[in-house]
Image (cartoon, helix red, strand yellow):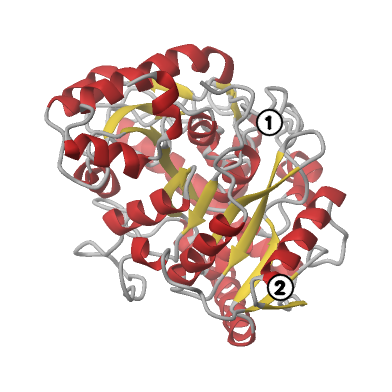
């Protein structure tokens, strides 16, 4: 196999070649390592190299759909026994994971060879991947721009062709935002579709969901088939799926009722590139036979913002305090970035009553979204309010969370809604800006409706394929 051949294959294609004996898992791992060594110095996508782990796995790969496929774990919640999960923080050091996360076990059962961990912002707090510990991850489409966050390292590695897919998770957009910034497919599944065990059952009131970023829709669907489903002891779980998600791609979605929005929910117009992306996608959907009209759910954004910040800050504080209790260490402001320190202090001041009220706000939002999706099958927006940010747009040393987030409030107008409501949403690479930067288009569906999203995504991938688009840093 040559580097060029490796670059043209998605994960399922690689796994099929290994099963047929046309290429070995060890060959795939060496090709991936070659590409990581070539591109990572410029992109800073991978922060922990685990080449020996991947090489050992490739000697006797598990016979799953992704048999022998090179893969990366995110440095947040991607627990691998014996390896630290730092969450991009100087404070989170010295404690290797005692066991694999349940999701990591399921990734392994799918057949992958794990080669490293990927760059993240500290504790996944930002829609850009820039931390004091690791430094910025750089976008292979333009290295002066952000990869998005918090799964930015994973997205950069997949977009540059180092691996065909990689672990990601999403508490406010952290799968979809990097997918949008790097020209990838990013599905945030329904709440509790993937388990968070073996220790955790729920993170931040159900805000956080796990999955991958990938270059093709079928890799996303097939990996969710491998990982979805409850684990014994889970506090709740998602509705059962009708059939394997991979099978959904060959099924027609039918005539869908699609609502699209050209403003954020406060009525502000989006960036012109976003407007073009939405208008073009709405036309494409109309041409495909769907009913498309402009509409939006009635969401009080101030209430959502207050509730989200309360749960997010309290969850951050709980996570830091749990690590402190386990290690006997006290977090100091010299070990946490300024923004993290400010959110940590804010989280410690949240009362139990305030937290419960915030969760109640999420439940109200969930009911509003359910009402909206009783009329519309799909809500179409862009994933972000504009093309990928320039690196350095956010001052992570600012201890005032309000001040630190101010420059990017218009940048993330939609993604947190689906985290709060629990419904699935997917970013697809359907538009590029005049300057050559990806602009992701987002599709949200009702609770439990990943199958519908995959049917629509399969139709759109066939109608407007993106496989031939490659960033400057590639191959």
Nearest the eye: 402 or 176:
176
Q: Is residue 80 above or below residue 225?
A: above
Instruction: Give the foreground label among 2 and 1.
Output: 2
- Spatial distance from mark 2 to mark 1, Cα to Cα? 43 Å
Say what secondary structure mark 1 lies in: loop
Residue 313 in sight here: no
Instruction: Give the tally of numbered discs.
Output: 2
* Residue at the spot of label 2: 286
User: Which residue is found at the position 29% from the left and 54% from the top?
Assistant: 227
User: Which residue is found at the position 41% from the left and 66% from the top?
Assistant: 250
Name the spot of residue 262 as percent of width and height, x first.
81, 64
Please give the label number shown on residue 94. none
* Residue at the spot of label 1: 396
User: Which residue is found at the position 22% from the left and 22% from the top?
Assistant: 26
Q: Residue 49 falls in which quadrant of the image?
A: top left
Name the spot of residue 388 as percent of width and height, x first.
72, 38
Name the spot of residue 435 as percent of width and height, x first.
80, 33
Q: Residues within 10 Å of mark 1 (few under 14, many from 20)?
A: many
Task: Answer whether labels 2 and 1 touch (C-beta < 8 Å).
Answer: no
Nearest the eye: 101 or 277:
277
Residue 430 in sight here: yes
Q: Earlier in the sequence, mark 2 or mark 1?
A: 2
Name the spot of residue 407 as percent of width and height, x first.
81, 41
User: Which residue is found at the position 78% from the left and 41% from the top?
Assistant: 433
Q: Residues within 10 Å of mark 2 (few under 14, many from 20)?
A: some
Say what secondary structure mark 2 lies in: helix
Q: Is residue 448 above or below residue 326?
A: below
């Amino acid at each position: 196999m040559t580097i060029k051949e490796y670059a043209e294959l998605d994960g399922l294609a690689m796994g099929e070649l290994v099963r047929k004996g046309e290429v070995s898992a060890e060959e795939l791992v060496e090709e991936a390592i070659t590409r990581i060594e070539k591109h990572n110095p410029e992109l800073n996508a991978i922060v922990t190299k685990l080449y020996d782990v991947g090489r050992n796995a490739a000697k006797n790969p598990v016979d799953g759909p992704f048999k022998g496929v090179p893969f990366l774990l995110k440095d947040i919640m991607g627990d691998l026994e014996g390896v630290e999960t730092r969450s991009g923080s100087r404070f989170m050091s010295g404690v290797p994971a005692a066991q694999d996360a349940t999701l990591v076990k399921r990734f392994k059962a799918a057949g992958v060879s794990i080669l490293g961990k990927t760059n993240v912002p500290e504790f996944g707090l930002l829609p850009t991947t820039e931390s004091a510990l690791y430094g910025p991850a750089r976008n292979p489409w333009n290295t002066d721009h952000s990869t998005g966050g918090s799964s930015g390292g994973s997205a950069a590695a997949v977009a540059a062709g180092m691996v065909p897919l990689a672990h990601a998770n999403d508490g406010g957009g952290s799968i979809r935002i990097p997918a949008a910034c790097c020209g990838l497919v990013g599905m945030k599944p329904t709440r509790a579709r993937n388990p968070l065990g073996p220790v955790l059952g729920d993170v931040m009131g159900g805000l956080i969901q796990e999955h991958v970023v990938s270059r093709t829709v079928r890799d996303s669907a097939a990996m969710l088939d491998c990982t979805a489903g409850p684990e014994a002891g889970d506090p709740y779980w998602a509705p059962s799926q009708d059939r394997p998600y991979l099978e959904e791609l060959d099924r027609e979605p039918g005539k869908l009722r699609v609502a699209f929005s050209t403003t954020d929910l406060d009525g502000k117009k989006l960036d012109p590139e976003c407007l073009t992306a939405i208008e073009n996608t709405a036309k494409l959907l109309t041409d495909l036979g769907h009913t498309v009209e402009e509409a939006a759910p009635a969401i009080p954004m101030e209430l959502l913002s207050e509730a989200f910040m309360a749960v997010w800050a309290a969850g951050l504080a709980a996570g830091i305090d749990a690590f402190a209790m386990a290690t006997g260490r006290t977090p100091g402001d010299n070990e946490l970035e300024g923004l993290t320190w400010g959110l940590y202090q804010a989280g410690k001041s949240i009362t139990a009553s305030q937290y419960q009220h915030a969760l109640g706000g999420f439940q109200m939002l969930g009911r509003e979204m359910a009402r909206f999706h009783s009329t519309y099958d799909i809500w179409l927006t862009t994933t972000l309010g504009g093309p990928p940010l320039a690196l350095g747009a956010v001052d992570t040393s600012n201890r005032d969370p309000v001040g630190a987030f101010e420059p990017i409030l218009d940048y993330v107008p939609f993604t947190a809604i689906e985290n709060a409501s629990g419904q699935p949403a997917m970013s697809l690479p359907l538009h590029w800006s005049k300057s050559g930067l990806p602009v992701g288009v987002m599709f949200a569906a009702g609770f439990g409706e990943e199958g519908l999203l995959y049917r629509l995504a399969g139709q759109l991938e066939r109608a407007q394929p993106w496989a031939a688009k490659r960033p400057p840093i590639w191959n």
